[in-house]
Amino acid sequence: MRSPVRLLQDIWFCDVQETNDGVDLMKTYSKPLKRRFRVSATMGYVRGSAIGWNLLYDRYVDCYDRNFKPPEGTMCFVDIIPVLDKDGNLAMKDVPEYDLDGTPILDDDGNQVTHKEYITEPDYIIKRILNTQKGIVARFVLSRA
């Protein structure tokens, strides 16, 4: 049985890469991919004891597109809409840096030191994919990121 169109919600999926930049751990997100799926409204346990899963989840997504196969660990925007730049990537902003006492950090020229941060961060991560070989539906189990 397919979900009615009125129950579908926009979800953006993106992969994350973590790289070490000195002592900082930098996250880099891929270009978000927008899809429309049915999203659950409640949280609890996955009801699938026949396949042996007993996962605590925050939400789940029912996917009827058999060609869409994101890996586990993919980040998702479900409750928030990501802010994108003109190229379709996640937009970034300059954030000023401060000392522990709250004074701004200045460089040699007297300008305030800034670093880049994403304006919107993903709010969920795909924890597990419950799928069958011949079934129509795949279920993505989501957990808060």
Image: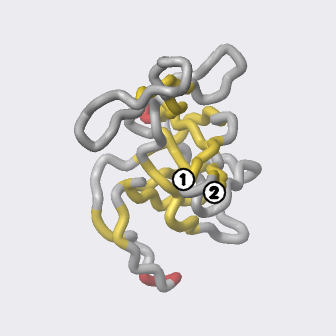
Res 18 seen here: no
Callout 2 crowding tier (Cα within 10 Å): few <14, some 14–19, many ≥20: few
Query: Which element is circle 1 on?
Result: strand
23 vs 98, left or right, is right
Cα distance, mark 1 to mark 2? 6 Å
* Amino acid of disc 1: Asp
Question: What residue is pinned by disc 1?
Answer: 24
Residue drawn at the location 52% of the way across and 45% of the way down: 76
Which label is found at residue 128? none
85 vs 54, left or right, is right
Residue 78 position in % (x across, y down): 44, 39
Q: State which quadrant residue 79 falls in.
A: top left
Residue 103 position in % (x across, y down): 29, 30
Where is 87 relative to 121, above or below?
Answer: above
Query: Which element is circle 2 on?
Result: strand
Residue drawn at the location 28% of the way across and 65% of the way down: 44
94 vs 98, left or right, is right
Where is 90 relative to 13, above or below?
Answer: above
Res 10 seen here: yes
Residue drawn at the location 58% of the way across and 22% of the way down: 84
Question: What residue is pinned by disc 2?
Answer: 20
Q: Seen from this angle, which residue lies furthest front?
A: 108
Residue 90 position in % (x across, y down): 59, 29
